[in-house]
Image (cartoon, rainbow, N blue to C red):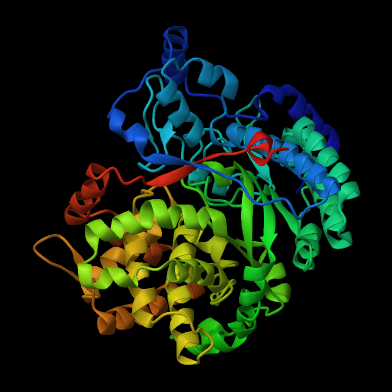
């Protein structure tokens, strides 16, 4: 039952100071008092770790845009900065400016800024500053002392809610506050900026979406704006903004974190990609799994386009950077409309040149390195996003959605599904002659090199965890071999067999909503074994960055 407005207002008033962040534990507060006084310093971390990111200038050609469109981009970047501030509150809780000001070492400060707090996102969220304990699994979405059992047994009215934070009242009882109330001031300003941007839009459908998204920020009702976003086809500028992904909530995987991307559409590349989404219903029928696990028909009214991204904010900018987007996450929108898949071409190219190619030179046998290509990397990434539309969204065992039934493991398994079914799609479309660039070896071997790239994102990342599972599973199946020099070689036949059997395993777990089975899979396959750890250390010794960080903003774009 929902709280009355009066009761809810009284609770909100008494706990207003906690609305934006969870209260730190007593021990953490004592540690922080000392650390803040003397300044935060690097601890339990080698200084070489501070160099795992390489800076890339995030720019794009804006010469084809009108002055009005450029003014609109300024508004969208300003709204995105608010999403960034809100994400700091959700992920960390303490004041960003005060926290960073207490770090004297410039390199350490930059590392903390990239990680949105004192925990290393690509190293299992381990603290790298004095004064901080382990990161709470629920980040700042829940009280730090809450257990899964307590929340499940509580009377909180939206336990699985995407758009609320959970807090304690004066009696210690749990209750929830909608984002629109917890972050009212910030969201009101962001909504104002989106409405101002809508008046500058030269595309009617985009203006409509911006207005509806502004309304959603203030109501926590996002589905209508998701449908509006799906209906946009011709807009040259785009923005993905709001509380979207649930990866930050590692306690349940329920609550969405704020983020934003500002995007410029690459019309030429998008035209090349437009045809592939139409193949989803046909490919769904051919999935290597029993019929009951593929009875849902994915929407084929989907959009597949290439973009240059000109601004990242919030969750999308924390730690490892996203290079492709598949949205909306709303299961109903997906079934009725499909999804839009956005390939972030300039960010993708930066990672390929600065990370993928050097990794291949260190870990792939020389005779297979010629198969590491940007076209294959782009396609594997693109079809990963397309493959999110395949499989099943609602369990066949009456356990609700896959996301709800698999809880904190849902994201890792979904990313694993998209990776493996993306490769399945490439294989099928190559056979049908729909993909004409490259050979199957290009896609398989680039995929293998991509595992080494993504597994370095660590156990706290859903993508990194998915890659660990796949690497260990492929190793068991003999999909690749490792020679005495420590170089890897793909076995094409065994890779194909392993791909099919892993697809079947993941789709079955998702369809059954089998929490125990996915927990066992992650426990047995979700870690980095000794040999792989040694090989990844070779990449670090060769000074190959783990990921990129961006020099970005209005000044970079000349705005």
Q: Is residue 544 left or right of residue 422?
A: left
Q: Is residue 459 above or below residue 30?
A: below
Q: Is residue 187 above or below residue 21?
A: below
Number of labels in the image equals: 0
Q: Is residue 436 left or right of residue 69?
A: left
Where residue 303 appears, as percent x and y from the top left, is 68, 71
Q: Quadrant of residue 265?
A: bottom right
Looking at the rendered image, the quarter that the C terminus falls into is top right
Q: Quadrant of residue 553?
A: top right
Residue reaching furthest to the bottom? 432
Where residue 545 appears, as percent x and y from the top left, is 36, 45
Residue reaching furthest to the top? 37
* Residue at (22% x, 43% y) in the render: 541
* Residue at (59% x, 71% y) in the render: 393
**Is any part of residue 527 visible from this angle?**
yes
Residue reaching furthest to the front? 63
* Residue at (35% x, 22% y) in the render: 42
**Is any part of residue 454 visible from this angle?**
no
**Foreground residue among 490 and 387:** 490
Q: Quadrant of residue 103?
A: top left
Where residue 488 appears, as percent x and y from the top left, is 21, 66
* Residue at (39% x, 60% y) in the render: 466
Where residue 299 appears, as percent x and y from the top left, is 68, 78
**Foreground residue among 183 and 105:** 105
**Foreground residue among 220 and 123:** 123
Q: Is residue 522 left or right of residue 343?
A: left
Q: Is residue 425 above or below residue 282?
A: above
**Foreground residue among 162 and 52:** 52
């Amino acid at each position: 039952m929902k709280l009355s407005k009066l009761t809810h207002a009284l609770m909100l008033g008494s706990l207003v100071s906690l609305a934006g962040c969870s209260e730190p534990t007593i021990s953490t507060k004592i540690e922080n008092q000392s650390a803040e006084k003397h300044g935060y310093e690097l601890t339990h971390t080698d200084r070489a770790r501070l160099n795992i990111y390489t800076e890339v200038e995030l720019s794009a050609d804006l010469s084809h845009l009108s002055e009005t469109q450029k003014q609109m981009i300024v508004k969208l970047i300003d709204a995105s900065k608010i999403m960034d501030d809100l994400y700091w509150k959700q992920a960390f809780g303490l004041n960003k400016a005060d926290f960073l000001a207490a770090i004297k070492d410039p390199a350490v400060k930059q590392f903390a800024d990239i990680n949105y707090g004192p925990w290393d996102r690509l190293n299992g969220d381990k603290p790298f500053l004095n004064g901080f304990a382990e990161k709470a699994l629920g980040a700042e979405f829940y009280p730090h002392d809450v257990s899964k059992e307590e929340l499940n047994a509580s009377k909180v009215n939206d336990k699985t809610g995407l758009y609320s934070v959970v807090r304690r009242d004066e009696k210690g009882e749990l209750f929830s506050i909608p984002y629109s109330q917890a972050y009212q001031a910030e969201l009101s300003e962001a909504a104002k900026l989106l409405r101002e941007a809508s008046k500058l839009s030269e595309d009617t459908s985009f203006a409509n979406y911006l207005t509806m998204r502004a309304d959603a920020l203030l109501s926590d009702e996002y589905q209508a704006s998701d449908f509006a976003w799906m209906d946009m086809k011709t807009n040259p500028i785009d923005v993905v903004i709001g509380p979207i992904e649930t990866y930050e909530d590692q306690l349940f995987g329920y609550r969405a974190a704020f983020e934003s991307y500002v995007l410029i559409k690459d019309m030429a590349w998008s035209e090349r990609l437009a045809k592939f989404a139409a193949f989803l219903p046909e490919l769904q029928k051919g999935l290597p799994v029993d019929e009951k696990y593929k009875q849902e028909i994915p929407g084929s009214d989907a959009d597949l386009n290439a973009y240059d991204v000109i601004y990242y904010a919030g969750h999308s900018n924390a730690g490892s950077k996203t290079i492709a987007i598949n949205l909306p996450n709303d299961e109903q929108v997906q079934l009725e409309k499909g999804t839009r898949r956005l390939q972030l071409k300039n960010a993708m190219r930066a990672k390929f040149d600065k990370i993928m190619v050097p990794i291949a030179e260190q870990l792939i046998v020389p005779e297979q390195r010629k198969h590491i290509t940007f076209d294959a990397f782009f396609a594997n990434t693109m079809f990963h996003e397309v493959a999110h539309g395949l499989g099943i969204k609602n369990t066949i065992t009456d356990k609700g959605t896959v996301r709800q039934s698999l809880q904190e493991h849902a994201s890792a398994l979904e990313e694993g599904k998209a990776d493996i079914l993306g490769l399945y799609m490439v294989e099928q479309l190559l056979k049908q002659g729909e993909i004409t660039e490259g050979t199957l070896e290009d896609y398989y071997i680039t995929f293998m090199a991509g595992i080494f790239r993504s597994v370095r994102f660590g156990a706290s990342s859903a993508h990194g965890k998915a890659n660990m599972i796949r690497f260990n599973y492929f190793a068991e199946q003999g999909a690749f071999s490792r020679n005495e020099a420590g170089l890897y070689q793909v076995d094409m036949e065994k890779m194909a067999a392993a791909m099919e059997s892993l697809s079947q395993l993941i789709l079955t777990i998702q369809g059954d909503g089998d929490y125990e089975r996915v927990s066992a899979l992650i426990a047995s396959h979700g870690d980095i074994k000794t040999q792989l750890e040694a090989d990844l250390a070779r990449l670090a010794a060769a000074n190959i960055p783990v990921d990129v960080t961006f020099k970005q903003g209005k000044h970079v774009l000349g705005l």
